[in-house]
Image (cartoon, rainbow, N blue to C red):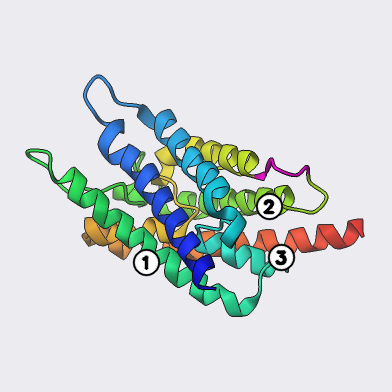
Amino acid sequence: MTRRLAAEFLGTFWLVFGGCGSALLSAAYPHLGIGFAGVALAFGLTVLTGIYAVGYISGGHFNPAVTVGLWAGGRFKGRDVLPYVVIQVIAAIAAAGMLYLVASGKPGFVTGGFASNGYGALSPGHYKLASCLIGEIVCTFFFVTVILGATSARAPAGFAGVAIGLTLTLIHLIMIPVDNTSVNPARSTGPALFAGGGYLGQLWLFWVAPIVGGIIAGGVSRWLEKAQA
């Protein structure tokens, strides 16, 4: 278990540092910014590379909603859920802290939103709570569904990381304007602790919606697998 948790720590750290780091350090850079598409690709690349780097050790969850979804789908032991979620959150906070150390080295640095997720006034496009709630549930549902399908014994071996990475990229292309894209409670928690204020007050949504989406995906996937048996 120690090695599995260490792998989850590294993968989650990489996801938050790489994904949120691209948003903080590159996306808004004058004349050279990578934009929404670049940030979306960065998140997809972090999960793709993380899966191939340490996924064979821990399963490559890097996300509490994925862990809970895999449990709901009968692919993960219930006794291991809490340790995985705890280490994922710790890794996300550590990555956000490291990003703060890097970002604060720029003259005139202001913490601002710090790549956090939000709705209403804290949404990039000022989308309301209901829009963010629905979007997060739907996108997490499909993200976990793809994970469960791509890692099935019936799926082509060796391509799961590509499918999962591309799915996360697509999800970010959809949701960045809406709420900066979560589908991952750990990813949301780390930056929110540094942004503070309203972002912390809205953090509940980015735990509830992804977990709900993951559980629904797990249940649907289990039903579909039984229908194919």
Badge 3 amino acid: Gly
Q: Residues within 10 Å of mark 2 (few under 14, many from 20)?
A: many
Residue 13 in sight here = yes
Q: Position of residue 166 (x, y in %)?
A: 58, 37
* Residue most extreme to the bottom: 79
Residue at image point 46% right, 64% down: 6
**Vertical side of 209 occupied by 159: above or below:** above
Q: Which residues are magenta?
A: 156-160
Residue 34 part of the magenta-drawn span = no
Q: Position of residue 54 (x, y in %)?
A: 53, 53
Using the image as rendered, state which of residue 49 and residue 97 is in the foreground: 49
Badge number at residue 90: 1
Q: Position of residue 10 (x, y in %)?
A: 43, 56
Q: Provide the secondary structure element on which disc 3 rests.
A: loop
In the picture, which quadrant includes the N terminus?
A: bottom right
**Vertical side of 133 occupied by 21: above or below:** above
Q: Position of residue 209 (x, y in %)?
A: 51, 60
Q: Residues within 10 Å of mark 1 (few under 14, many from 20)?
A: some
Q: Residues within 10 Å of mark 3 (few under 14, many from 20)?
A: many
**Vertical side of 87 occupied by 49: above or below:** above
Residue at image point 49% right, 67% down: 5
Residue 204 in sight here = no
Residue picked out by circle 2:
145
Q: Provide the secondary structure element on which disc 1 rests.
A: helix
* Residue most extreme to the top: 31
